[in-house]
Image (tube, grey):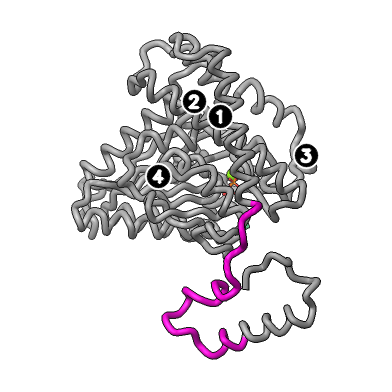
Amino acid sequence: MQDLNFPGGKVPLTSQMKFISEASHKRLPCYRVLNDDGSLISNTIHEQVGEDVAVNMYSAMVTLKTMDTLLYEAQRQGRISFYMTSFGEEAVNIASAAALSPQDFVLPQYREAGVLLWRGFTVQECTNQCFGNKDDKGKGRQMPVHYGSNKHNVITISSPLATQISQAAGVAYSLKMDKRGACAVAFTGDGGTSEGDFHAGLNFAAVMEAPVIFICRNNGWAISTPVHEQFRSDGVVAKGLGYGIRSIRVDGNDVIAVYSAIGAARNMAINEGRPILVEAMTYRVGHHSTSDDSTKYRPMNEIEYWKTARNPISIFKKYIERYGWWSEDKESELARNVKKQVLEAIKTAEGMEKPALTEMFTDVYDQMPPNLYEQERSIRDSMKKYPKDYPIDLHV
Ligand SMILES: Cc1ncc(C[n+]2csc(CCOP(=O)(O)OP(=O)(O)O)c2C)c(N)n1
Ligand SMILES: [Mg+2]
């Protein structure tokens, strides 16, 4: 039978009434370079990572984990209101950031603080944001961990899921029109892929040939929703075909695999002008946030397995030890320095004044409208009337 020329191209005809199966019997494979004992799998194609980059990536992962541990504790002590950790996902954070260029625009979900740290946004800056003090660039108006930095080309995190995905398609298209030789990178969780914005963003990027990398951290859970209640497709990578997007599934706990895949994705996105979808398979070892207790909905041994046997930091430590790039002395020195750095940052951030009250009402409109003046007056009256209910250090 002949092909028929439909709008959109020629399609072969068939007399067989054959439905396309909803699933292939084999799941799509996951690209991996490192064994769990830190040795290289033979015959893999991957980036050669030298000592400096490897040690920097390892140190950044340890910094992220230490910052998470101590800021999580600070929340438990009532010193900050909220926190989210990246435990178990340090490799996706750091290795993807390391494979990008500082000119690439990153649009994070919220579990990617490591990308900021890698770009030079300091532990002190993260801590200032979490404490909402006067050095927080967001002027204390966002929830903790909603970082963003103009200087580092990282768009501020917004709580509503997936909004960053369609925005990234637009950012990428503009980078392409301006011939900037850079790409946009949007992170999402597995849960974020159920939002309409995910589908709109991928389709828009494919049609407009926008240089954007969509990185999905498939960590198994969206708060208490497991992935089998999230989608019936073979995870996220399978969706790429539906949108005409080149895609790869990668072991998200393997630093070298993530680094290599994101580096290759970046080259294709920019040089060929196309979006790329990366599904990084990982696990959320921590609770969803400080408002969650994940032992209520998942078994302890599952958490323990990913925390120990599949820990991305320990796997990569074994890799750098094999090359003689790391030692127990270096490990203790790093641990000591990083802990000191984070504790000092917390002390400084906590001791700093809060932003002036007026900041709560500015930056939304060019000229402050009467209703905001009214709200400001009302809060000042309330402070006078109930001084005990407001922090004494509130800078008015
Ligand atoms: C539009 C929207 N719906 C619901 C929520 C509440 N919410 C916050 S995080 C989250 C789970 C997201 O899971 P996932 O994308 O897998 O990311 P992870 O937390 O696992 O990193 C939900 C449902 C939200 N913030 N925005
Ligand atoms: Mg998730």
Residue positioned most to the bottom:
370
Q: Amino acid at mark 4?
A: Gly
| Ligand 2, image quadrant it occupies | top right
User: What kind of element bears circle 4?
Assistant: helix
Q: Give how far apart the Cα atoms at labels 4 and 2 are.
A: 31 Å
Query: Which of disc 2 and disc 4 is earlier in sequence?
Result: 2
* Magenta highlight on residue 372: yes
Tell me the magenta residue range: 350-374
User: What kind of element bears circle 1?
Assistant: helix
Q: Name the residue carrying label 1.
A: 62
Q: Give how far apart the Cα atoms at labels 3 and 1 are.
A: 25 Å
Residue at 47 percent across and 57 percent down: it is 156
Expressed as whole percent of the image width and height from the top left, the position of residue 278 reads 42, 39
Q: Give how far apart the Cα atoms at labels 3 and 2 are.
A: 29 Å
Q: Name the residue carrying label 3.
A: 295
For this rendering, which residue is in front, 247 or 130?
130
**Label 1 environment density (alpha carbons within 10 Å; few <14, some 14–19, many ≥20):** some
User: What kind of element bears circle 3?
Assistant: helix
Query: Which of disc 2 and disc 3 is earlier in sequence?
Result: 2
Marker disc for residue 240 = 4
Does residue 196 lie above or below 309 as drawn?
A: below
Marker disc for residue 58 = 2
Label 4 CB, ligand 1: below 8 Å? no
Q: Give how far apart the Cα atoms at labels 1 and 4 are.
A: 33 Å
Q: Amino acid at mark 3?
A: Thr
Q: Give how far apart the Cα atoms at labels 3 and 4 are.
A: 33 Å
Q: Are marks 4 and 2 in contact (CB under 8 Å)?
A: no
Q: Is residue 40 left or right of residue 15?
A: right
